[in-house]
Image (cartoon, rainbow, N blue to C red):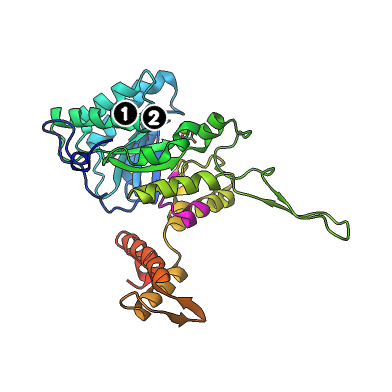
Amino acid sequence: MKTAADFYKPLAIGAPAPWRELPIVLERTIHFFPPHIEKMCAKVPAMVKQVDVLLGNLEDAIPIEAKEAARAGFIKVAKEVDFGATGLWTRVNALNSPWGLDDILQIVESVGDKLDVLMIPKVEGPWDIHYVDQLLAQLEAKYNVRKPILIHAILETAQGVKNVNEIAQASPRMHGMSLGPADLAASRGMKTTRVGGGHPFYGVLADPRTDGGERAFFQQDLWHYTVARMVDACMANGLKAFYGPFGDFDDSDACKAQFRNAFLQGCVGTWTLHPKQIEIAKDVFSPEVKEVLFAKRILEAMPDGSGAVLIDGKMQDDATWKQANVIVKLAKLVASKDPERAAAYGF
Ligand code: GLV
Ligand code: MG
């Protein structure tokens, strides 16, 4: 265990000092693009204004024969496009794959000063984060990268879930985590071929009816437990939690329901793999207008956050004041980027 005094020291001479707190940025949508496909790269400049984060995916879904083209394509896009306030992330190949090391080496060398976050898949424990942390510090020092690159872990192995808190605490470079329901399902031996979302067989059956009629079946959220663990580990350590992929592009309603569960549980954003998921994500991960207006009323009624008041028959106290603050803080962040929502929230 590192001492508290050492925790924030740069890991290489000449590397920038780690962030002490995460930069405050809106990250509702992490939009994935495949950088080996020129047509998709050509769309990136137009997408910059539509999403909060653009992520060049180098890992799963990129064919083996296109791995190097994807890396080169990402570097080209990162160099050429002005991302403004939109985040630039990449998902590199796993640390035990033949490409992970070269992904990190070449990307930091070429575009380390533009990259905000490095997404690391299949993280199993703090040792994976320590390795990337040290390597990034060496590369930042070598290539004179002045802004520390953050690490985002995908929670997608049984061992990773077991070690989720240690992963969150592994480095001041930790940005957050995303749920990886496809790999996680495989790693855990879950019996589903779906990428995120519910399963029609996972639920509870109501008690038998006295009239012998059909018993109601209530489908449950397969991912509830994991999202909750991820949110607790992230929030307890000052990081951000994200939902991951939702693979059924034709089922926008189920996608929305899954995103909404994650949002309500504490996640701040999600991956979007298809353009039609972008508006769903922006909608879900921006607080509801009604909630924001009510939260503002709580703050107005309790200027110093203490005591108790009744608003529309609902009890408000120090704790609900804190809840209201979470919503209003997020609404202000959304408003700073989204004039339409700013007007609806009354900012
Ligand atoms: C994402 O990477 C997943 O495995 O679901
Ligand atoms: Mg995965």
Q: Amino acid at mark 1?
A: Gly
Q: Quadrant of the N terminus?
A: top left
Q: Amino acid at mark 2?
A: Ile
Residue topped by disc 1: 73
List x then y, in percent, for residue 201.
69, 42
Q: Residue at x 37, y 17 (%)?
A: 98
Secondary structure, mark 1, is helix
Secondary structure, mark 2, is loop
Residue topped by disc 2: 37
Is the Cβ of the residue at disc 1 closer than 8 Å to that at disc 2?
Answer: yes
Left or right, residue 197 beside residue 164: right
Farthest-out residue, right: 211
- On the question of residue 270 being in view, the answer is no
Residue 62 within the segment the image draws in magenta: no
Left or right, residue 254 beside residue 54: right
Sooner in the amino-acid sequence: mark 1 or mark 2:
2
Q: How many marks?
A: 2
Indicate the quadrant where residue 329 lies: bottom left
